[in-house]
């Protein structure tokens, strides 16, 4: 009998988490061929989410709570949960109830059919305009920078086989990006259609700054294409400047009046200067991440692991 591990990163979910766990219990009751466990990772939520996790762990033997020492972000919380997971299959989903646990059988069937990883695909994304925009940008970034197939839709609701999870856990650097880790481990990835629900309580934990941080993390940790793009832009700018200089000399030799406009000159200087600063900032971002990784900054720090039989503090 295969064991399925559900990993749920938790942040501001004190009002939704119990319903999500109950839905998992109900869904797995109909899948007698599987045993299951649930790992709830509290990402230093400022509300009473940790108390809810303690309450759930007190009632169920197969639930493990993980409390992180500070807010490390969703992807670090997923890595912390996967570290605790023991299942042959690992299912990751959200804590707000928008990802339907009752349809987990579709993801598991996809794994049984031979896929290494199966992502839920939503035909009806019930998110805010801001989150939909963020999803589109993330889609473009993963396709261009990480080589994601165009037809593959990646979401926060997915299932993976054990060997994929083990491969992901080998990544020890301070900036985990789950999609990048999946794409570098396998191309045998499938989609299954599930319903996407409206958010009943609260709002998304992703702000603009967090989304930008996530995108930066994705393409600086797993791709050097931005540096190649910077090189390409630099070469094109240099060629354009050289050609323009030749044209200016020719026009001068042919005694063609050349109007030198202060405004246009300043525009070119500001444009080139801005591009140079952007490229330097991009290079600095790479160097900074290398420096942080060399210093062995942790992906996450587990403050406490909570189980029904006992509560124990574990430091990593």
Image (cartoon, rainbow, N blue to C red):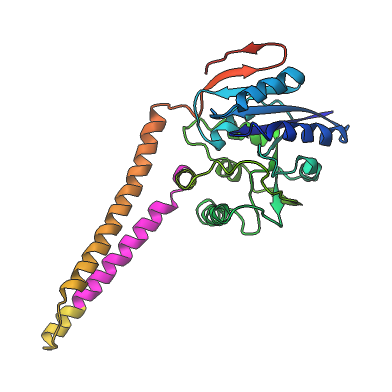
Is residue 238 in view? yes
Observer-nearest residue: 58 or 182? 58
Label count reads: 0
Rendered image quadrant of residue 110: top right
Which percent across, then down, holds residue 176? Answer: 52, 36
Residue under the point 88% across and 36% down: 30
Q: Is residue 261 magenta?
A: no
Q: Is residue 233 magenta?
A: yes
Left or right for 303, reference 192: left
Picture quarter with the N terminus? top right
Which percent across, then down, holds residue 224? Answer: 43, 49
Dominant secondary structure (helix, strand or loop) of the stretch shown in magenta = helix
Rendered image quadrant of residue 293: top left
Rendered image quadrant of residue 124: bottom right
Residue 231, relative to residue 34: is it above or below?
Answer: below
Which percent across, then down, holds residue 232? Answer: 36, 61
Is residue 112 in view? no
Residue 223, relative to residue 269: is it above or below?
Answer: above
Which percent across, then down, holds residue 115? Answer: 74, 45
Q: Which stretch is magenta?
A: 217-246
């Amino acid at each position: 009998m295969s064991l399925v591990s559900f990993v749920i990163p938790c942040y501001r979910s004190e009002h939704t988490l119990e319903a999500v766990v109950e839905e998992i219990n109900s869904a797995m009751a109909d899948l007698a061929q599987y045993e299951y466990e649930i790992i709830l990772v509290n990402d230093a939520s400022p509300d009473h989410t940790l108390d809810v996790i303690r309450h759930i762990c007190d009632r169920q033997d197969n639930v493990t709570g993980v409390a992180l020492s500070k807010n490390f972000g969703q992807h670090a919380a997923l890595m912390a949960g996967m570290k605790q997971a023991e299942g042959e299959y690992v299912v990751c989903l959200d804590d707000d109830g928008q990802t339907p646990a009752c349809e987990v059988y579709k993801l598991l069937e996809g794994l049984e059919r031979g896929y290494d990883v199966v992502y839920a695909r939503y035909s009806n994304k019930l998110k805010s305009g801001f989150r939909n925009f963020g999803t589109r940008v993330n889609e473009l970034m993963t396709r261009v920078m990480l080589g994601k197939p165009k037809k593959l839709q990646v979401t926060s609701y997915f299932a993976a086989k054990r060997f994929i999870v083990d491969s992901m856990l080998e990544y020890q650097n301070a900036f985990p990006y789950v999609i990048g880790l999946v794409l570098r481990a396998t191309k045998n990835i499938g989609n299954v259609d599930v319903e996407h629900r409206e958010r009943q309580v609260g709002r998304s934990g992703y702000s603009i700054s967090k989304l930008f941080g996530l995108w930066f993390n994705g393409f600086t940790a797993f791709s050097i294409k931005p540096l190649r793009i910077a090189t390409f832009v630099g070469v094109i700018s240099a060629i354009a400047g050289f050609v323009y200089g030749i044209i200016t000399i020719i026009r001068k030799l042919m005694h063609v009046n050349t109007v030198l406009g202060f405004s246009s000159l300043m525009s070119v200087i500001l444009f080139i200067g801005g591009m140079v600063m952007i490229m330097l900032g991009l290079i600095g971002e790479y160097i900074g991440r290398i420096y942080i990784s060399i210093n062995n900054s942790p992906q996450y720090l587990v403050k406490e692991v909570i189980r029904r039989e006992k509560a124990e503090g574990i430091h990593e």
